[in-house]
Amino acid sequence: MHGSTRRASVKQHFSAVVHDSRDEKHNTKSSKNNFEQPNITVSGKAENSYGFLTMELVPGQACAEQLFPGARPEPDLSPPSLNYTLRDKKLRIAVFWCFVFFDCALVPVGLYLFLWYNNGPGSEERDPLSANLVLSIVTATIGGTGIIEFAIGMWKLWKKGSNCRVIGAKSRWYFDWFHWWFGLCLLIVVAELVVGTAFTKPNRRLLAMPLSSVLAVFGALLLVTDVLHLFSVRTLVRISSVPRGDRVPVGIYPIIEDVCAVSGSGTTLFRESLERRYKASPIFRIMLRRLSVFWTLGALGCSAGTSFMIWHFDDIDLAFGCGWMVPFIWAGVWCLATIVYVQHMLAKEKRLWAEVMALNVRAEQSDQV
């Protein structure tokens, strides 16, 4: 009686989790990198990887395989490992983002205010620096960290014997999804800075737009990718480790894969581990879908709000400062919220996985008796 009650409790728990996501049914042939979940057969019925969670777990059958199709549980009863941790990278991450904040926020705003009101048009000097010269100096100092990071990433992916290329890469020119879009963002930023200082009277509002434009690009990218994923559209091009012709992945998936594999030194092993974890765990898939929506809405909302401040605030100095500072404030809040949510979901995933595996062991023992 106790075993039946326990199985029913676990079943209801998983049903509540999975009913929060959409049922995904696919009839196409699965491949090595296919993001569709394979059909399984239980008691003579074919159910997809979500539908089976609402069924009774029959003692003696592979209950864990029903709940996590394709999984290979580790000895510690944990989900498939990602083979990646941030514990030994916290200092490096902190130093990197300090450089980014200094390079893309403090320097543009601080140098602009200092030069403009001490040596430029806002000063009381008889022969001040021109507005064009002041802003040309400011823009020349922007973006060094991003350009260096882009170059390092390109070298890691291009060099002979690279250990961080996408799964199935056949040549040195298989750059990943994030790298291509990062390159596009750099071009947009350079174009805005060049146009903003191209005239005798520089457009200071346009010069405050680069970060908003980057958020708009990535927000739109996540939105389009998520919509295509929702309608099970097939990819026309390779999206990182997802080959052409497979289902479009969740928008945030290739970004996590590429950033951790290249910038985070997770290598191709992380790409493979992430794919294995994504296919094995429904809770992990739900978590990524929610995070994708969370970052999509946040990026687009922050871009729109910051752009409004830049073009509608009467005080142009305040508008310039908001354009370079607000995106960093938003990113900090979103990152903290993401850390808390991910820790909660991973702990929940691990706990439920262990419960299901323990249930499976007890069910097999009961069947043998």
Image (cartoon, grey):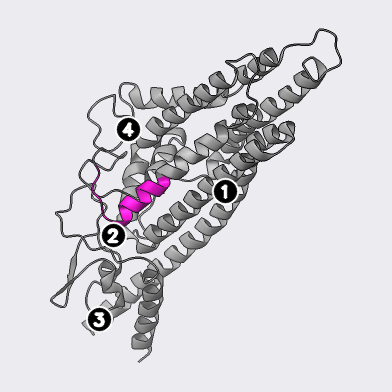
Spatial CA distance of label 1 from label 3 is: 43 Å
Task: For mark 1, give the secondary structure.
Answer: helix
Spatial CA distance of label 3 from label 2 is: 19 Å
Q: Main secondary structure of the magenta part?
A: helix
Label disc, if present, on residue 298 of the rendered structure: none
Identified by mark 4, the residue type is: Arg
Spatial CA distance of label 4 from label 2 is: 24 Å
Please report the bounds of the magenta region as a residue range: 222-235
Identified by mark 2, the residue type is: Ala
Figure quadrant of the N terminus: bottom left
Label disc, if present, on residue 335 of the rendered structure: 1
Which residue is nearer to you in this view: 126 or 99? 126
Which callout, 1 or 3, points at the residue further toward the start of the chain?
3
Mark 3 closeness class: few <14, some 14–19, many ≥20 residues within 10 Å: many
Label disc, if present, on residue 165 of the rendered structure: 4
Task: Report which residue position mark 3 lands on.
Answer: 59
Mark 1 closeness class: few <14, some 14–19, many ≥20 residues within 10 Å: few
